[in-house]
Amino acid sequence: MSATPLAARDRRPSSLLPALREAAVAALVALVVAVPLMGIQTVQVSSGLELRTRWSWVVIAVGSVFAGRLLLTLLLPARRQASSNAAVGPLARAFRDLARWLGPAAILFALSLPLLPFSDRYILDVAILVLTYIMLGWGLNIVVGLAGLLDLGYVAFYAVGAYTYALLALNFDLSFWVCLPLAGLFAASFGVLLGFPVLRLRGDYLAIVTLGFGEMVRVILINWYKLTGGPNGLSGVPRPSFFGLPFSASPPAAGGETFSSFFDLTYSPMHRVIFLYYLILALALLTNLFTLRIRKLPIGRAWEGLREDEIACRSLGINPTNTKLTAFAIGAMFGGFAGSFFATRQGFVSPESFTFIESAIILAIVVLGGLGSQLGVVIAAIVLIGGPELVRQLEDFRMLAFGGLMVLIMIWRPRGLLAFREPTIRLRPARGAGSLPRESAQGPG
């Protein structure tokens, strides 16, 4: 009976010493990084710049890294072993049951958010930002999650939609409702142009080409000064109106009514914010509905097949060229829609708003939420975009909190928050014992 405790005691030092060694190495790296970044601070004084030290911050950072690395090294293998022994089926069913009521509940909450007593301008601005990234995540989820094509230049389509709306509205005096479909059409065209050079590429090579495409678009926006305004961008982008009723305190010079005068309301700047919130909410819900419907169509099944095995798709007669092009085009279209909303919300667009970090954030939302999971994109966007906004008052640590959230998600849910992927079509056994399985009513698997 004493053999097991003795064996455990014999094995304990052998597992503790490597853990201490790894924690010490991680703490040493943290010390090298923390000394210039946190230990030394430049302060503006009357005579110029002055160096001040904050060694207590360095001690806290190094100690936190040492303790965290030690705990991860000791606890993570046991957790992986427990998760590998657990049944996947009950967990997937639990997530599916949760999504059945969590999705409608989230929609009801989103619809009623501006009417809640705690809702104010700041909360609505954060909600608009989160919904914009949710829409971008759902658009990129078509390319990465469904078709399995790693795209690191998705922000290029976002920029094309924003600049298309800004140029059409400023030069041709077109309304938002006319520019919105045109922005999506232009972005989809750029998606097809991107798709042609990358048809034969996969994996890392595809990611490098799409990354280069995104940077090319940003450089063109900076250097084409006559059209895009260069680094200065385009200002004075028209705001959207409610079917021709502007959200202003006084009627336009040409005459007419405003939103508040037409509905006999007291003018408030919140009217425009609430309208923008419901506008991006409607666009995001339409993106979600379109994605859910198209993944059940033959093209959606072709995307899933391409993601799992391209060679098998070719053997089944699926054209990978057309499949990739449609994925790039439709994903880019929703990026263009989101870009046009961004332009009309900000009233200003510049190349600095469409850097590579934006593509990285959108891709992180899709990957951390779970490839192919619509609900996972929502949860990841709330965590990665709304989470850092809650600690905005900690200016020096805002990006640190963003990185910490990503690290925690990758540690505890390495395959994404909602890691399971339900097939669109599955074979169900026919009634009667001993009979062969028959195809489901949705179509062949």
Image (spheres, helix red, strand yellow):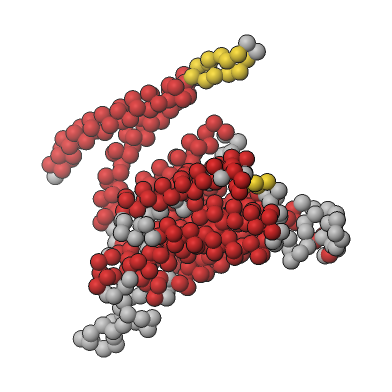
Residue at point 48% right, 36% down?
Answer: 400
Q: Where is residue 210 in the image (x, y as percent from the top left)?
A: 40, 51
Asked if residue 374 shows in the view, the reply is: no
Residue at left 68%, top 46%? 235
Q: Is residue 113 depicted above or below 351 in this figure?
A: below
Percent x, y of residue 118: 69, 51
User: Which quadrant would the N terminus be assigned to in this image?
Assistant: top left
> Along the horizontal axis of the image, is 61 left or right of 310?
right
> Which of 155 and 413 lies nearest the eye of the viewer?
155
Q: Where is residue 311 in the image (x, y as percent from the top left)?
A: 25, 66
Relative to residue 408, is residue 168 drawn left or right? right
Based on the displayed image, in which of its 4 quarters is residue 160 positioned?
Answer: bottom right
Quarter placement of the C terminus: bottom left
Specify whether residue 309 is in view.
Answer: yes
Q: How many labels does the image show?
A: 0
Which residue is at the far top? 47
Tell me what residue is drawn at x 57 percent, y 15 percent. Answer: 49
Pick whichever, 205 or 99, lies toward us. 205
Left or right of residue 153: residue 275: right
**Nearer to me, 174 or 92:** 174
Residue in the foreground of this view, choosing between 207 and 102: 207
Who's the residue at 27% across and 65% down the image? 309
Farthest-out residue, front: 226
In the displayed structure, 311 sits above or below 366; it is below
Residue 314 location, x and y as percent? 27, 70
- In the picture as drawn, the residue positioned furthest to the bottom comes out as 432
